[in-house]
Amino acid sequence: MGSCRYELASSHAFERIAEAYVALDVEWRYTYVNAAAAAFLGRSAEELLGKCAWTEFPEETVRPFRAAYEQAMAEQRPCMVEAWFAPLGRWFASWAYPAPDGITVLFQDIDARKREELRLQTQQQLMEQAQQLMHVGNWSWDVAANHVAWSDELYRIYGVDPAQHAANVEAYLALVHADDRERVLGIIQRALHDGAAFEFEERIVRPDGGERTLYSRGVVETDADGRVTRLLGVCQDITARKREERMSAGLHQILLDIAAHKPLAASLERIACQHEVMNPGSLCSLLVLDGQRLLHGAAPSLPDDYSKAIHGLVIGEGRGSCGTVAWSGKRVVVEDIATHPYWEDYRELAMSYGLRACWSTAVPGSHGEVLGTFAVYYREPRAPQPDELASIDRLIPLAGIAIESARLLGRLRERDRFFEMSQEIFCILDPRSERLVQFNPCLQRLTGYGEDELKTLGYRQFLQPLQGGDASEAIPTTVEPGQTREFVNRCVAKDGSEHLLEWTSFATSDGLLYAVARDITERHRVEQKLIHAASHDSISGLPRRAMLDEAMARMLDSPWSEAWVVVVGLDRFQVVNESVGHVIGDDVLRRVADRLRAAVDAQWLVTRIAGDKFAMAVDGMNHEEVLALAERLRAEVARPIEGQDYRLLLTASAGISHAPVHGNTPAALLRGAEAAMVQAKRDGRDRIGEFSVAQKRALDERVMLGGRLRDALRHDELVLYFQPQYRALDHELTGFEGLLRWNCGELGQVSPARFIPVAEALGMMPEIGCWVFAQAARQMREWLDRGHRGFTIAVNVSAQQVQHPHLVEQVAEVLQRYNVPAAMLDIEMTESALMENVARIRTTLAGLKSLGVQLSLDDFGTGYSSLAYLKQFPIDKLKIDQSFVRDLPADEDDCAIVQTIIELGHQLGMLVSAEGVETQAQAAFLAGLGCDELQGYALGMPLPVMDAERYFVGVRDSFLV
């Protein structure tokens, strides 16, 4: 009970203590926390009691306290620690009193005292640093005793040891530079005489030979009688400041020389002299790197012969100090030339001129490249001092600027010479004043104005916009800085002549335009000529079809337009070219074009759309007026055409189409007018044809079929049917004729009579014919492989195929590919196909015969039937056209014609075949006349390949059995 009262009383006592107080057991757990401590720790006593002191707060915040407490417990000795407590952001002092069963700790807030201590420490450090940085020392001179007292800093400034220095005025004066000693002594004597304050600058020479510049200020103390008793003063080392002043003044002058474009040698010499002045005893050399060699730049204090000897030094490792530096880009310090390996090849040269040390540094360019070297020689071996290297480093950038400026100036002079010689205009324009700031002589040559005239004229007086353009378009008035603009204007010369100029300009931040111009007058003329040539025919001078399409399109844009298209085609104009030549033919076309152009109102466009075809589109006319126009054009062509050494009479056929009846596009109307013109030629020429609705349907069908026919081969829509051919006497199978069929996916079965003319018009027959050859040869191979023998397959070729230069090669390749005998292939041609380019046809047929194929003349009797040509061609068989067979044997004329053809063929050694045999009477009659071969529906229908094979097994129509 007494113990409890004691603990309660103790607790009450501790609560009255103002300082924070806690008690911890040996496990560092809180056993007591007074109110001040709870407030200090930011926790209630209940929260802390029983908990470990080191786990309740971040480890780094309690680390200094824990270390002190643990040491106190270990040593069982009280301790005190001052530390920063981060959770509260303040400084605290803590006293720890250890006991065997725990430790008692008191805390006291010392933040204000601690902060003041730190502030005073900082001020003291700053003061000491300031004194050191200012290099200030103080002194006093007892005049009567002639004793001089120096501060430690002053001894450091003078570089003397206090123990070895006599403390009198004579010892001081001995350290003053000889050139300044008399002046300094005079100032001191005046102060002693006048008793007034004094100040002066002086140079001193330290025991190690170093020279310093000092600034001193002092006052005079006197006794009651006015006698001087003591001089007091402070002394500041201003060597660095004075050196900087001299260096800055030198650098400024060097920069002025560079800015004034002084020669490079002069600028480099001033740089070398500046270093030599700042560092007495040094001998400077600046070399400029040119490729792999160092060239002399400046060396004012080195012997000229030595500078000449090292001029052109090849750089590389071990090539002296400078050659090595230029090669490596790194500073080289050679303290003794006599022993350094870099100077092995140059040692004798250098030492012969008394040079013993050489420190060399690279002169870098603005992009880090080496421009040259900055070398410092001495006549005694020595290492550089920091201030000497600092001087070199201050001057090296100026050397780089001087070298780069000289090179840039050289390039600018070359550029100026180039600009002066250039055929392009270079100028700087000021849009604000509308005057030229600068320009090259090309502008003077172009305008005819003198230099002074161009400077005084506003440039808009001779640089003007294009015809119809706005004045502001001649030269841009506002261009954003950094923006590039291109424009074209007219340059009106002094004599009134004009030139087209194409400009590229660049705006700068000061509002000026830097511009380059090219004279494009001739180019523009050529371009216009090329544009005209692209849109106009070179022979007639008339516009081409593209311009006609544009004119028609404009007409058709109007909903009320009734546009008409008239196409005029010269009749048999190819005869003119063949008879009198193309030169006269071109002259005729020019004259016809002039007549047609003169016969039409100027508002209508007359064009040449093909070799001998002309076309025009008109609007606002009725039917009779258009017919009259076409007749007028036809009549103009019909008038005699006379030129030098020729006189011709021509005729023309014209075709007319009309919108919207015949189409509502330029292509449809032109196509219709051309079709009408072609029909007029077929109807006898020298006439006018009007496109009809029936023609339009037929033409539309041809266009539609043409579009689909191009895909027929790719989509496997073409197929061969086979119609049998028999010997007339015994009706033995002799072979087949391969007949082309088209099974269109959209149109179904399309008759050959419909699509063959379209294929010929599109020039597709060579491609289709090659496919037919391959299919026929492949089928022959299949039937041969199945054991069938003694048959041929006949294939029709068009006029386009016969004219094809590679027909023989195509046939040979197909026969070789399928390995079939050439004699089994029978090539059928029409008479008309043989009559075009007879010489080429003869060569082609001879080539085919050399392969061994059979040649047949199809539809004989309906074409030219020229016996002279027939004799020239190696024909094996004549095929009588079915028009002569159809009415046999009743028609006597047909009988006579057929008999004549059979006899003619036999006389020429040819077989004769009749096609279109449809009755027994026709077959018997033809056999009786001696016809060799029969073909027709009476003997067998054309069938697909799978069905045609049955003809090999002797199947006949009933009336032949």
Image: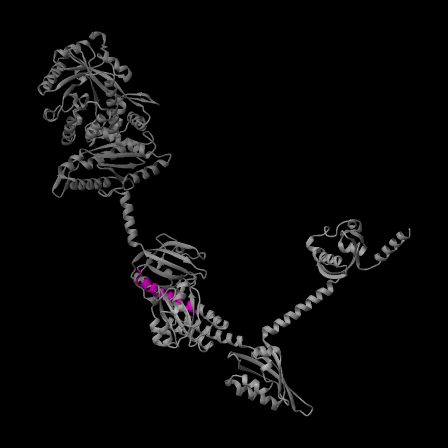
Q: Magenta includes 932?
A: no
Answer left or right for 853 relative to 711: left
Quarter of the picture containing the C terminus is top left
Q: Magenta includes 413?
A: yes
Q: Residue furthest left?
A: 907
Q: Is residue 682 visible?
A: no
Viewer-proximal residue, 470 or 627?
Answer: 470
Segment colored magenta? 398-422
Answer left or right for 332 relative to 878: right
Answer left or right for 685 relative to 379: left
Magenta-drawn stretch, dominant element (helix, strand or loop): helix
Is 331 rendered above or below residue 556? below
Image coordinates of residue 850 in percent, x first then y, are 15, 27
Is 668 rendered above or below residue 97? above
Tell me the quarter of the picture where residue 337 sits.
bottom left
Tell me the quarter of the picture where residue 156 sits.
bottom right
Answer left or right for 721 relative to 463: left
Viewer-proximal residue, 145 or 464?
Answer: 145
Q: Is residue 278 visible?
A: yes
Tell me the quarter of the picture where residue 122 sits.
bottom right
Image coordinates of residue 816 in percent, x first then y, are 22, 26
Is 498 rendered above or below residue 860? below
Viewer-proximal residue, 712 or 536?
Answer: 712
Colour convention = one colour
Count of picture labels: 0
Image coordinates of residue 493 in percent, x first then y, are 31, 60
Viewer-proximal residue, 589 or 922?
Answer: 922
Image coordinates of residue 270 in percent, x first then y, are 42, 74
Is 108 rendered above or below residue 222? above
